[in-house]
Amino acid sequence: MRKFMSSRSLWLVLILLSISAASFGQVAISVSFGPPALPVYTQPLCPEPGYIWVPGYWAWDPDFGDYYWVPGTWILAPQVGYLWTPPWWGWSGVAFIFHPGFWGPTVGFYGGINYGWGYFGHGYEGGRWNGNQFYYNRTVNNINVTNVRNYYNVTVVNNNPTRVSYNGGQGGIVANPTAAEQAADRERHIAPVAAQTQHVDEARANPQLRANVNHGRPPIAATPKPTAFSGGGIERASAAGAPYHPPAKAAAPEANGKQSAPRPPAETERPTNESAANRQNNVPRPPTPIHAQNLPAHSNPAPSRPPSSDAERQYQQRQQQLAAQQNEEHERLAQQQAQDHQRMEQQKASNAQMQEMERQHQQQTMQLQQQHEQQERQLSRQAPPAPHEAPRAAPSERH
């Protein structure tokens, strides 16, 4: 398959992916099992006016094949009038995909996840901008009115008191973006500020924040400011949101508290019709590429023998037609994704916009691959039966 992406575009994408994988969440990463429930904890006191609450969430560490908790914290807004849209995990039909958070003039879709403190699934009820000043809703935020004088009191009814931390899939939140949220996702965004990326980095480096160590109840659930993981104002989780039962293959801590050698991470896994022998021997399943151009080309399987009937000839023709059709669809999607990269490069897109594009590309690629596998399974069920061979003579007995 021809290469559609310029070297400059490819370089830009690789840089963005390496930055985001190391510094913020797990962009363009999918995981086969969902994150733990949101823990129960208290919001620290707002440190100063102008800080906006950024709720905690579970991120994925591929080095240990485990989720880790990113504590909630208060962050200075990067720009007057901007609000935070939290990150979220969503089921794509084949895996859980991470959607990074962003700053923007309007709160976008965050999976319908109830993070609390104003983030109750849609929008933000914790405060609003009035000119150059941010006013806090005191009924859902922990503020000291002596230090923070811009506040109001509006009672918010929380009709979604769940602690589920992902959208879709078995047991997940059932929510779709509203028209306003879809419009917000298309607005100009600002990626997480430097203080947030450093906050995530330090959370990832802390073994006690890994789910297999704290079992869904992190010892540092929230901080008064980014990276303030020690000292006053830290809030521990009072309880796990639900019992945490990770799959057996997830890395587990040793008895002395040290992390055992990481097992293969559960990233980019997808269900396949693998054989019982493969499952028994733990043969790893191949990862799903982000872009269609990285998918292998379809080839017509070589017949083991010449066709012996009209049914077999017709079946081989259908195999050839399907392979040609699937290769055309591969090429069409690869061209579309390459054009997306060129357009974003010309528009000098932000990191958040590039990350969102990569997420969409991976989802498109997975859906195409899943569709092709289903087509091949359906065609294989139409294969004509093999002709019966003449029975062989039994070996003679010795007297």
Image: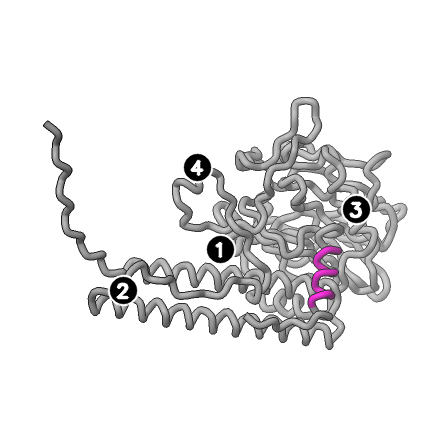
Does 12 appear in magenta? Answer: yes
Observer able to see residue 296: yes
Give the residue type that dot 1 points to: Gly
User: Is there CB contact under 8 Å for labels 2 and 3?
Assistant: no
The residue carrying mark 4 is 280
Give whichever of discs 1 and 4 has the lower sequence position: 1
Q: Nearer the viewer, residue 15 or 201?
A: 15
Q: Earlier in the sequence, mark 1 or mark 2?
A: 1
Name the amino acid, label 2. Answer: Pro
Q: Main secondary structure of the magenta part?
A: helix
Is residue 336 magenta-colored? no
Q: Are marks 1 and 3 in contact (CB under 8 Å)?
A: no
Q: Which amino acid type is shown beneath numbered disc 4?
A: Gln
Whether residues under marks 4 and 2 lie with C-beta atoms below 8 angstroms apart, the answer is no
Q: Distance from label 1 to label 2 (Cα)? A: 39 Å
Above or below residue 131? Residue 87 is above
